[in-house]
Amino acid sequence: MSKRIDRRTFVGQSLAAAGVMTLASGAARSVAPNDKIGIAVVGAGGRGGSHIGAWLKDSRTEILYVVDVDEKSGNKRCDMIAGEQQGKRPTFVTDMRRAFDDDSVNAVSTATPNHWHALCGVWAMQAGKDTYIEKPICHNIAEGSALVAASKKYKRVCQTGTQCRSSPAIIDAVKFMNDGGIGEVNFARGLCYKRRKSIGSLGDYPIPKGVDFDLWSGPAQFTDPKNTRGRFHYDWHWQRMYGNGDSGNQGPHQTDIARWGLGIDSHPVSIISYGGRLGYQAERKNDKYVDAGDTANTQVSVYDYGDKCIVFETRGLEIKPSADDELNRLFGSSKGNKIGVVFYGSEGYVVQKSYTKCVAFDKEFNEIKSFGGGGNHFGNFLDVCESRNMDDLKADAREGHLSAGLSHLGNISYYLGEDNKVSPQQAVEIISGVKSLDDNKKSLERTLRHLEDNNVDLNKYPISMGPHLKFDPQKEVFPDSPQATAMITRDYREGFVCPRAADV
Ligand SMILES: NC(=O)c1ccc[n+]([C@@H]2O[C@H](COP(=O)([O-])OP(=O)(O)OC[C@H]3O[C@@H](n4cnc5c(N)ncnc54)[C@H](O)[C@@H]3O)[C@@H](O)[C@H]2O)c1
C-alpha cells in the first residue's frame, strides 16, 4: 500500500472518529481524483503566488482550486498554473467555502490578509482539510487559541508560515546556542528596521473592479469602502482592523526565532509597548496630512517571561547611523534595513541575519561561527500530511499562536496607551521603572535618537506610552485590566464569526 493511500485512509478514519461532516453537503468523503494531495490556495496575491510556486514544484500536489475575492488576481493565477508545470487549470472561486465543500481537496494553504487567517483555518479544519496558514496565523489571541483547538479536535495538520523553522541555518544556530556555544542565553532582541513609506491619506478611493469587498472584509467590520487607503492590496497591513503593523507582519518571524532560541513555550507574564506612527507628516511637508495607517511605524515592545525576556523593535523611517553601535557591529552596517534577531549570551552573541544566515560572535564581536542554508517548509507540511506524524511538523498551530501572540500583546499595550503622549523625559522615567533583562532606558534612547535623526519633532509629535500589563499565560487574560482582556478578541460580523477555542 502506498504512503499516500495510507494518508487518505488515515484522513477518513480520523474524520469518522471526530464525527466531522463536510460543511454544507454532509456528503460522504470521497477519494481525491488522483494519487496527489489536492490543494486549495486561498488568497492569490503576492504571498499566495509563492504558495502556488511551491506546490507546483512538488510533484506530490495538484492545485485544485484558487480562491480569491479579487477575480482578476485569481484568474491570472489560474491561467499561470494552467500554462506552467501543472498544465491543468484549477477551479477559480471567490468564496473559500465552495472549495472546502469539495471532498477532493485535502489541504488548504492560505495567504489572505491577516484578519481572515484564523477563520479560514478553522473552517478548513472543520471540513477535514490540513492547513498551511501564513503568519501571523491569527488577528488576535482568541483566534490563535481557536486554531490550536481545531487542529487538536479534528486531528488536522496546521502549519504556520514561519518558514525559518525549516531553515538549516537557524536550526543549526539554535542547536549551537542550546549546546552552550555562547554561554547562558536569556535575552533576545528582534528587529524590523525596515523603511516603510507613508501609505497616503484616507480618501475616496474606488475598490478595484472585480473585488468582492464584502467577502474581503469578512470577519472585520464592514467599513465605508470609499474611506480607505490608496493602494487596496497589501497596505491593509498598516490598518489595525485588518493588519497588525510590522510587529505582526515581519514580527512573527523574528519573535518566533527568539522564542525558539530561548526555549520559551508560553506567553509572557508582562508586556509594555511604546511608539507611534511618526515622521510621515514631515515626509509630506504638510502638518495636516493624516496617514491612512493606524498601526505604529515605530514601536518597542518588551516581553517579560520572568527568567527570560524578548524585545521587539520596529522602525519604519530611514535607518541612519545612530546610537546603535552594538547592533551596527553585529549586523556589519550602520545604515540600511536591519531585520533579524540578536541573542545575547554570557560569552557572546548569535545573530540571525536572514532566512538563510546566522552568525555567532564572541564578546569582542569577532565572528566565531556561521550557519547557512535554506529549507523547504512547504515540503515539511506535505511530509506530515502524508505521514500524520504531527511531531515532525516544524511550526504547528501552538508555535504559530505563541509567536503571533507576541505582536497582539504588544499592540494591546500600545493601542491602550495611544492617547498617553509623553515627552522624552517622561518616557525615560516610565521605562526606567520597568524591570527587564534589557537595558530599557538605552533601548528607548536609541529609539528617540532614531526619530530625531529623521527630524521628528518629539514635542509636537510625542511618542505614546502603553501601560505595563500583567498577563496570565494560561488563562490568556490580563488580570488587572478588563479593557486589555476585552482586546483578546474582536466584534465579528454575522456569518464571519471565528469561534472561541471551546466552540470549534
Ligand atoms: N511567510 C512569509 O515570508 C510571508 C511573506 C509575505 C506575506 N506573508 C503573509 O501572507 C499574507 C498575504 O500577504 P500578501 O502580501 O500576499 O497580501 P496581498 O494583499 O497582496 O494579497 C492578499 C490576497 O488575498 C485576497 N483575499 C482577501 N480576502 C480573501 C478571502 N476571503 N478569500 C480569498 N482571497 C482573499 C486578496 O484579494 C489578495 O489577492 C499576509 O498575511 C502576510 O503576512 C508571509
Image: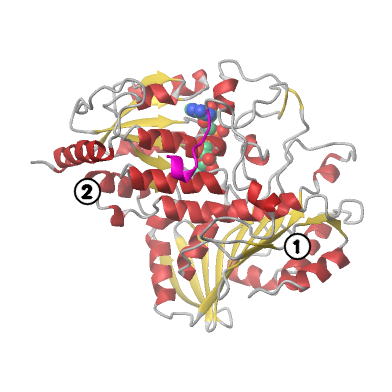
Which stretch did the figure color magenta? 496-504
Q: Quadrant of the N terminus?
A: top left
Q: Quadrant of the C terminus?
A: top left
**Above or below 121: residue 105:** above
Which secondary structure lies at badge 1?
Answer: helix
Residue carrying label 2: 387
Magenta region, main secondary structure:
loop
Position in image of residue 160 (x %, y %): 43, 48
Q: CA distance from mark 2 to mark 1?
A: 47 Å
| Residue 345 shows in the view | yes
Residue at the (85%, 45%) spot, across then down: 282
Q: Quadrant of residue 78?
A: top left
Residue at the (45%, 44%) spot, across then down: 502
Q: Amino acid at mark 1?
A: Thr
**412 drawn magenta:** no
Say whether residue 426 is left or right of residue 80: right
